[in-house]
Image (cartoon, rainbow, N blue to C red):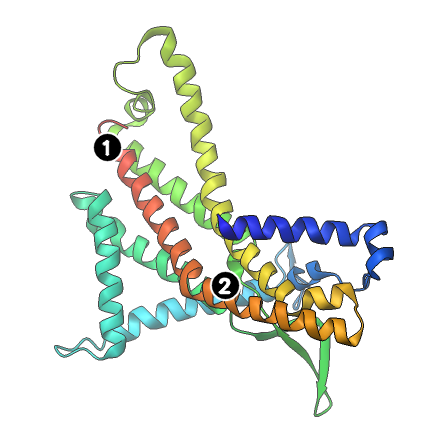
Amino acid sequence: MIKARLFAVAASFTAVLASPAGAVALNVNEDYKPQDEFALDPWIPIEIFGIDMSINKAVMYVVIAAVLSCITLIYVGRRMKMKPGRIQAAVEMYYGLIEGITKGNLSGKMVNRWFPFLATIFLFIWYSNMIGYIPLPTNTHEPFMLFGLEIPSLALYAATANISVPLVLTLVVVISYHFEGVRAKGPIRYMKGWVPAGVEGVAAVPIFFIEVISQFVRIVSLSVRLFANILAGHLLILFMGGGLVVLLNLALIGSLILGLVTGTLAVAFFIFEVGLVATLQAFIFTILSAIYLGGAVAEEH
């Protein structure tokens, strides 16, 4: 909530500065466009049947997160020891966390069936969030020359800061729990389960349609929650880490003073994002997925 308010204030402040009046009053650098940090320029253009399938930095971050997830689970799984090392101990703690989430919301065969899925989705989102705070050479708008080669400059970006990635993960979860509900109860009984027990007659009709709407709201809330938190965190770090100084285009003394203040805030935001938000958002997405899976097969919603 605090971060959302800070982001809203920063967005409002930026909108004022970007206005013609603000630009004249504060000598705003109109050439600086923070949104360019999130532009997805095609590195390898690919188009299949009119669909843009180009390789860009978002694809690179997704691949990195997927590879790290596979390496972590496969490497540790093949090297389990009676006396665990630090990596194995961390993975065992992670295993206990996902086991608690799974058994707390699912039962019977559902636990064994969906534990690997929940464990994978948590680790993938966590890696996606965490590597988003590691500066990588992905900024093709401001390259630099190194031994005659044009190298992209360092920048922060996260796959989960692109709405398409959380949306796809959400659709996988939604399709999965609807599939489990239909398989467990059959389509008719599953749809009837959307109306609470005891509600009958005409009153059941609006309640049913409200539940239909809530199913679509789940898609929005589950995907946008992850996307908005990661995007807001990156924007705050971007502005506080120097973007605001560039945007205001102040004189040397003013830039030094503002840079000192915003730089301190940038470090604080960075620690907050890495230490809490990245893991918390992976946890929330995973536990909500488990709740939806368990609710789909429960006798009463």
Residue found at the far bottom of this picture: 147
Q: Amino acid at mark 2?
A: Val
Determine if residue 158 is in view: yes
Please determine whether, in this image, residue 216 is positioned above or below residue 51: above
* Label placed on residue 62: 2
- What is the CA distance from the residue labelled 1 to the residue labelled 2? 34 Å
Q: Position of residue 283 (x, y in %)?
A: 35, 54
Please determine whether, in this image, residue 114 is positioned above or below residue 261: above
Helix, strand or loop at mark 2? helix
Q: Position of residue 16 (x, y in %)?
A: 75, 50
Q: Would residue 180 appear left or right of 68 to someone viewing this image?
A: left
Q: Residue at x 73, y 72 (%)?
A: 255
Q: Which quarter of the rendered picture does the C terminus lie within?
A: top left
* Label placed on residue 61: none
Residue at image mark 1: 298
Dot 1: few (<14), some (14–19), or many (≥20) neighbours within 10 Å?
Answer: some
Q: Residue at x 43, y 15 (%)?
A: 206
Q: Residue at x 39, y 45 (%)?
A: 173
Of 274 and 70, which appears nearest the observer?
A: 274
Q: Position of residue 47 (x, y in %)?
A: 66, 57
Of 245 and 31, which appears nearest the observer?
A: 245
Q: Position of residue 292 (x, y in %)?
A: 33, 39
Helix, strand or loop at mark 1? loop
Q: Would residue 71 appear left or right of 165 to someone viewing this image?
A: left
